Amino acid sequence: MKQEYHIIPIEYDQIRHIARKMRRNHAILAMIHGYLDQNGEPVISYEYQLEPNIESYTIHGYKELPSISDIYDKAAEWPERELNELYGFTFKGLDTSKRLFLPDNMLSGQGQIIVTPMEELIRDRYVDKSGAADNAANASGASSGVTFYKINTEEHPKD
Amino acid sequence: MSQIVPIGPYHPSLEEPVHARLVTEGEMIKDAEVFIGYNHRGIEKLAMSKNYIQATTLVERVCGICSHVHAMTFCMACEGISGVNVPKKAQYIRVVIEELERIHSHLLWLGVALHLIGHDSLFMKSWADREACMDILEELTGNRVNYGMCIYGGVRRDIKKDQMESVLKRLDVIEEETKVLTDFILNDKTVALKTQGVGVLTTEDAIRIGAIGPHARASNVPVDVRIDAPHSCYDEFDFNIVTYHTCDVFARAVIRALEIFESIKIIRQAFKNMPGGAINLGNSIPNIAPGEYMCRNEAPRGQLSYKVVSNGTDKPARVSIHVPTFKNAPTVPTMLIGNPVDAAGLIIASIDPCFSCMDR
């Protein structure tokens, strides 16, 4: 029997209940995915492996969700930390004191690297160490031989 | 008194950048922490700005070793959204390339592991055998890495009859040489001393932390997407899941050596039963209907999954890549504890990590 993919919409209160049930049934948590839909609404889907299929429990409209890392250990903790850093989702009960992917001082507050436009990331976060033009063309590496360094504007205000 | 020993992110015993912080007492590791993200290239974000043909080329570059499986799984997820039926011949060709990729990846890892335990003669033999596999891939696809075989709806190149004959002859040689290599691994004293009882991950821990692929199978957990949740045409082949019970670095070497024979078995069956017909549905840029799909595949290192969200344009709205190392890396601290510091490099390498894949 070949693998299939089933999407099941759920409500906020069901997230942890389903996680506990899946854990009891020895279902592997394949991944927690997040994205913004066509209306800019946040979507999170919990993908559980019920061989040979994937059941995707999907919730719309919440940027803050309960963590299931206490139920699924690292299998949930790393995806939740990834979503926190790359998309800015927050998970109640998740330890985000350390960064998983990004440097500790990048995008202070919360990382939203995927939802932030590229031009904004480049313009606001990186400047040419030599003090040359702080523009997107340079910062994207278009000019050869230029090395870029992160400038924390609060600790190191520009001269 | 405990001391902190940092390893990496750049270290001679590491093939790719990762940072491990070891808490030691004397020579022994008492606790460990792993830090990732040194290879983060923002590929998922970049994929959202490319059309489906460009995105296929991009995701193939997530990894230099298992590049085909990335492109294949991405295409399968896109095909899943639109409900396209891929021609049977294309499915067979995809499987052949995937299994060849598995053979060269396993031989590469065996070489790295043998080098790390100081057995450079076997390391060179393993990589010499791998060259034969690379030659086959070059003959079939035109490239040694980033094969460019997969496209939405099929494959780019056909495999001709004379190519099949040539590949089968070379596979015979690879099989014979791998038997010699496997015999060495099973019986060599140096290999045994350096790997047996080192970096143990018990079956219970492997299930709890969620290990997958050959790493899990070496802890006696029989998981394999090709059998548990078949995709493409894998349900038409006869092959076995290889498991081993010692749960240590030795088991991980044995598993990878034995899986090469299973892959050779699959390729022979694919060539024997290769169907006729088309190999793709054309080369136009696809406009995929709005929807989402997640597809899984058994990459050389374990389960690889792609989730693709389409908004009806020629560009994906979201590409989420979940690689085996993301699942296997959290097992590293558990394996390190109770081992001497000099084994740390080998234990980290024993999961066959691909940090380029993991960081994306």
Image (tube, rainbow, N blue to C red):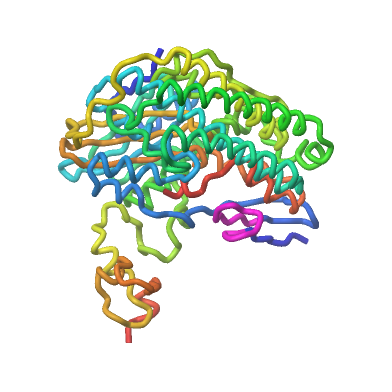
Q: Residue B355 at what x, y percent from top left?
A: 51, 48
Q: Position of residue B34 (x, y in %)?
A: 58, 51
Q: Residue furthest right?
A: B189
Toward the viewer: B14 or A51? Answer: B14
Residue ID at (39%, 54%): B41
Residue B142, percent from left and from top: 42, 39
Residue B266 to residue A103: above or below: above
Regarding residue B228, the answer to whether it shows in the image is yes
Q: Is residue B259 toward the left or the right of residue A24 in the image?
A: right
Q: Against A116, is B251 above or below?
A: above
Asked if A103 appears above or below B199 in the picture, the reply is below
* Residue drawn where x is 47% and y is 23% of the image: B164
Q: Nearer the viewer, residue B29 or B87?
A: B87
Q: Position of residue A15 (x, y in %)?
A: 36, 32
Q: Is residue B339 visible?
A: no
Magenta stretch secondary structure, dominant: loop
In magenta segment, residue B19: yes
User: Does residue A98 show up magenta in the picture?
Assistant: no
Q: Residue at x 43, y 58 (%)?
A: A102
Residue stretch rendered in magenta on the structure: B8-21
Toward the viewer: B136 or B311? B136
Along the line of sight, which residue is nearer the eye, B188 or B201? B188
